[in-house]
Image (tube, rainbow, N blue to C red):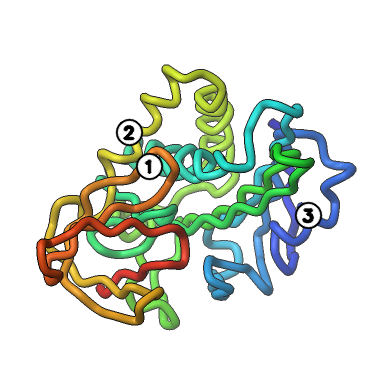
Amino acid sequence: MNIIWLDTIDSTNTEALRRLPELPSMTVLAAREQTAGRGQRGNTWFTEPGKNLTFSIVVKFAEGELHASQVHWLNYLMSDVVSMFLRSYGIDCTIKWPNDVYVQRRKICGILIENTLKGEWVDAAVIGTGININQREFPQLANATSLVRCYGQEQDLEACMEKVAALFQEELPWLFSERSRASLFRSYSNQLFQMGKNARFHDLLEDREYWGRIQGVEPDGRLCIWDLEAPGKPYRYYRFKEVGYIL
């Protein structure tokens, strides 16, 4: 993989999308400083300059390789890559559906994936990822943590980037066979944050808070929650931006 380091940029995802026609597949844009990093739901990703990994991986697909209805597999893949990276330091982590990574109820990684389509097929994916590495204080993020806070030692960012890129390159082929997808799905599902535990959720479709229990993820990417407060305790199924966690 070709890793391109940028000193200062607004957002690696934005830059990757700007340069998408000229960037070969498996190019990584990594920034030492992001001035307008973007997170899920339009949130801003705050990061201390020179302390963390903020990068975007460009992957281009041949027509017929990845259907538009299967883009959630990119979430599974990148979340699992970050999990493997953290576990290589002995750090136990969980994946907060759809694609944040948590350590002991604190966020250590966020992922924002943006795709371009050609008809019903994914033409290219820009997989934006922020992993907190050497930052110790998070005044704007009360529930954040980092590798240095969990592991106790600062790390070389370029070495960390190379490690993550190598893991991604190793796992990418998992998208293209049914058997390997099944393994990836099991790995992702087994690491779900709050899996099987009673927790509070906000149903954004009905604007209702309730106690529920995550049962797992459906093959189509929806989150399944058992509603503990509804008559008959039915299962509810959510797509991205349809449910929130109350932590």
Question: What percent of the width, then of the height, locates residue 180?
Answer: 44, 20
Q: Of all residues shown, which one is farthest toward the front?
A: 232
Q: Amino acid at mark 3?
A: Leu
Q: Secondary structure at mark 3?
A: helix
User: Do tag 2 and tag 1 residues touch (Cβ < 8 Å)?
Assistant: yes
Question: What percent of the width, then of the height, locates residue 87?
Answer: 32, 39
Q: Which residue is mark 3?
A: 17
Q: Amino acid at mark 1?
A: Ser
Q: Which residue is mark 1?
A: 83
Q: Secondary structure at mark 2?
A: helix
Calculate the distance from the C-alpha at mark 2 to the C-alpha at mark 3. 30 Å
User: Do tag 3 and tag 1 residues touch (Cβ < 8 Å)?
Assistant: no
* In this view, 109 is above or below 144: above
Question: What percent of the width, then of the height, locates residue 102?
Answer: 32, 57
* In the image: residue 17, left or right of residue 72: right
Q: Nearer the viewer, mark 2 or mark 1?
A: 2
Q: Nearer the viewer, mark 3 or mark 1?
A: 3
* In the image: residue 8, left or right of residue 103: right
Tell me the tag on residue 187: 2
Picture quarter with the N terminus: top right
Q: Earlier in the sequence, mark 2 or mark 1?
A: 1
* In this view, 98 is above or below 184: below
Residue placed at 66% from the left, 27% from the top? Answer: 65
